[in-house]
Image (spheres, rainbow, N blue to C red):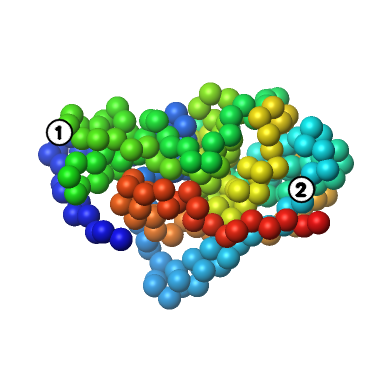
């Protein structure tokens, strides 16, 4: 992988990546790593190995999704049968995930945000909101793999999982589980998002959650901005019969 030199910008055009219309879950700026190398390596491996079982539906027309914001859990159901029960990272109090009844309206595997991403000029790459992009710099949106939108500006997508509300309103999925969700739902699949769901007390009680990703570093800017590698950076999905 080619290494890119990051050039400082003038103070008048300092680039700040903040929560955007789509959500802050794919912030292109890497978080500060405050953990030791050995502990981070162990935690990162556990995060990378995380996965959950999923079952393909008998009739896709009967599939629907329920999301519990309090339990931070999504339930993909076929009738009364759970096909996939997965943790999700939900919106912060300042940018909450909308509640109500929706439908999945678009599905795009290789989706890129159109409000935040990377400013590129020569061999320099900077995380940026599109409205703050300096003149003369190219723009490439942040990759948001397995995007399934349900309302303008809101959707499910791969992103760093947190054990607390942390997104700008989108629902982040673990990268190894996201392709399974993407396959199970269709455009038109019904979606109910509420503060809680009845399933929280049953099938949603003891689902293992990913290790805390808070101290993990972000992915290299050149990988995210110049390649499509992040869209396939996950385990090959398998399904239970």
Is tag 1's residue or tag 2's residue first in the polypeptide sequence? 1
- Residue sticking out furthest to the bottom: 38
Image quarter of the N terminus: bottom left
Res. 220 in view: yes
Q: Crowding at label 2, few (<14), some or many (≥20) Cα neighbours within 10 Å?
A: some
Q: Is residue 104 left or right of residue 16?
A: right
Compared to 160, does 151 lie above or below?
above
Q: Residue at x 45, y 51 (%)?
A: 230
**Tag 1 secondary structure:** helix
Q: Residue at x 40, y 41 (%)?
A: 142
From the viewer's side, name the closer residue of 129 and 125. Answer: 125
The total number of labels drawn is: 2
Image quarter of the C terminus: bottom right
Q: Crowding at label 1, few (<14), some or many (≥20) Cα neighbours within 10 Å?
A: few
Q: Is residue 4 left or right of residue 129?
A: left
Compared to 136, does 142 lie above or below?
below
Res. 204 in view: no
**Tag 2 secondary structure:** loop
Q: Position of residue 70 (x, y in %)?
A: 67, 41
User: Mark 2 highlights which residue?
Assistant: 56
Task: Tell me where residue 119 sits by quadrant.
Answer: top left
Compared to 114, does 174 lie above or below?
below
Q: Position of residue 33 (x, y in %)?
A: 37, 61
């Amino acid at each position: 992988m080619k290494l890119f030199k990051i050039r400082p910008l003038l103070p008048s055009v300092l680039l700040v990546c903040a929560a955007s219309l789509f959500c802050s879950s794919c912030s292109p700026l890497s978080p500060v790593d405050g953990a030791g190398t050995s502990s981070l390596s162990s935690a990162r491996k556990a995060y990378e190995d995380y996965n959950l079982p999923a079952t393909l539906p008998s009739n896709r027309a009967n599939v629907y999704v329920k999301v519990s914001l309090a339990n931070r859990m999504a339930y993909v159901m076929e009738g009364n049968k759970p096909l996939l029960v997965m943790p999700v990272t939900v919106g912060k109090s300042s940018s909450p995930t909308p509640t109500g009844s929706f439908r999945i309206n678009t599905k795009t595997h290789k989706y890129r945000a159109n409000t935040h991403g990377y400013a590129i000029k020569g061999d320099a790459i900077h995380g940026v909101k599109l409205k703050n992009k300096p003149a003369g710099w190219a723009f490439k949106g942040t990759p948001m793999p397995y995007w399934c939108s349900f309302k303008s500006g809101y959707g499910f997508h791969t992103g760093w999982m947190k054990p607390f509300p942390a997104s700008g309103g989108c629902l982040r999925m673990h990268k190894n589980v996201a392709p399974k969700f993407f396959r199970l739902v269709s455009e038109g699949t019904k979606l109910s998002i509420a503060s809680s769901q009845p399933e929280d007390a049953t099938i949603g009680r003891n689902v293992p959650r990913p290790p805390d990703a808070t101290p993990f570093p972000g992915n290299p800017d050149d990988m995210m901005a110049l390649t499509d590698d992040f869209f396939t950076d996950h385990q090959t999905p398998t399904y239970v019969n």
